Image (spheres, rainbow, N blue to C red):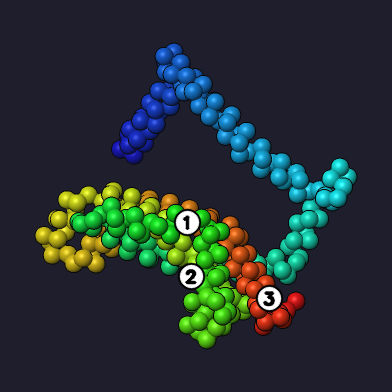
Amino acid sequence: MTAKTEAVTTGEPEVTERKHRKRLSEGARAERRLGWYLCAPAVVVMIAVAAFPIIYAIWLSLQRYDLRFPNEAKFIGFSNYGAVLSSPYWWHALWVTLIITIISVAIEFVLGMALAILMFRTLFWRGAVRTIILIPYGIVTVAAAYGWQYAWTPNTGYLSALFNNSAPLTKTGTAIAIIILAEVWKTTPFMALLLMAGLSLVPEDLQKAARVDGASAWQRFVRITLPLMKPAILVALLFRTLDAFRIFDNIYILTQGIAFIYIRIFGAAAPGTEG
């Protein structure tokens, strides 16, 4: 008897909620329709701006184009995808991109957190400190890449002179390391800016209470700051990962440019760049 009573009792809220959902008043239905009407223009714009280009790009990928004869396109299905996935150059580029993305984003997160705390806790010259830290991010990527290229150019670059006029950008391992270094230098301020916004979400009262309870600075950071900053951290990591995975201009300018300069200076291909 008790079990039946409990079953009936526990089932009443669900039945009541279902009836409430079914019995919406005319005013509630009108408000719901108004909400859909207000959202409709934004949905249409999103479909026109995002969905249509994606669908059109997929359609173009299923055809074979010759730039000399653009009107003679031919539908070939998934042959383009098969050619790409079977190419060793594509897989090599993918692994190099993953290495650059994972390492650069990890370093940027650590350094960005340190810079965010510095900018957030600075008491004197706060505006000047934030401006100086954000300068690298304000430089155009192409201009920054050319600066790093010149710095590592043999016989002219100041960084190359520190290493006996070597050409590290002509070798795979050292070139990847320098590309990661350039990415970290360029985009760490952006990571710091996003994380500094997350630091403002942490109530100062919790920090003071934990300090009174005897928690160390590291304990307050791990137990209070990081958990409350989780939304900002996820956004920062997502933005930087997507941006790093789309890297092209930095790699192209650094590697191709140095190879051509090496040929112009020494009259031969650099070691490790043959073929």
Between 115 and 210, the residue placed more toward the observer is 115
Percent position of residue 261, x then y:
64, 73
Which residue is located at x 11 percent, y 60 percent? 212
The answer to whether the residue labelled 1 contacts the one labelled 2, judged by CB atoms less than 8 Å apart, is no
Q: SS at mark 1? A: loop
Q: Which residue is label 2 attached to?
A: 181
Of marks 3 and 2, which one's residue comes earlier in the chain? 2
Disc 3 residue crowd, few under 14, some 14–19, many 20+, Cα 10 Å:
few
Residue at the top extreme, as displayed: 26
Which residue is located at x 63 percent, y 69 percent? 257
Of marks 3 and 1, which one's residue comes earlier in the chain? 1
Q: Looking at numbered disc 1 in the image, what kind of residue is underneath it?
A: Ile
Q: Which residue is label 1 attached to?
A: 139
Q: Is residue 104 left or right of residue 69?
A: left
Q: Looking at numbered disc 3 in the image, what kind of residue is underneath it?
A: Arg
The answer to whether the residue labelled 3 contacts the one labelled 2, judged by CB atoms less than 8 Å apart, is no
Q: SS at mark 3? A: helix
Which residue is located at x 65 percent, y 69 percent? 256
Disc 2 residue crowd, few under 14, some 14–19, many 20+, Cα 10 Å:
some
When asked about the image quadrant of residue 14, the answer is top left
Q: Looking at numbered disc 2 in the image, what kind of residue is underneath it?
A: Leu
Assign the C terminus to one quadrant of the image.
Answer: bottom right
The span from disc 1 to disc 2 (Cα, nearest Å) is 15 Å
The span from disc 3 to disc 2 (Cα, nearest Å) is 26 Å
Assign the N terminus to one quadrant of the image.
Answer: top left
Percent position of residue 240, x then y:
48, 57
Q: Which residue is label 3 attached to?
A: 264
Q: Is residue 103 visible?
A: no
Of marks 1 and 2, which one's residue comes earlier in the chain? 1
Between 147 and 34, the residue placed more toward the observer is 147
Q: Is residue 72 left or right of residue 15?
A: right
Q: SS at mark 2? A: helix
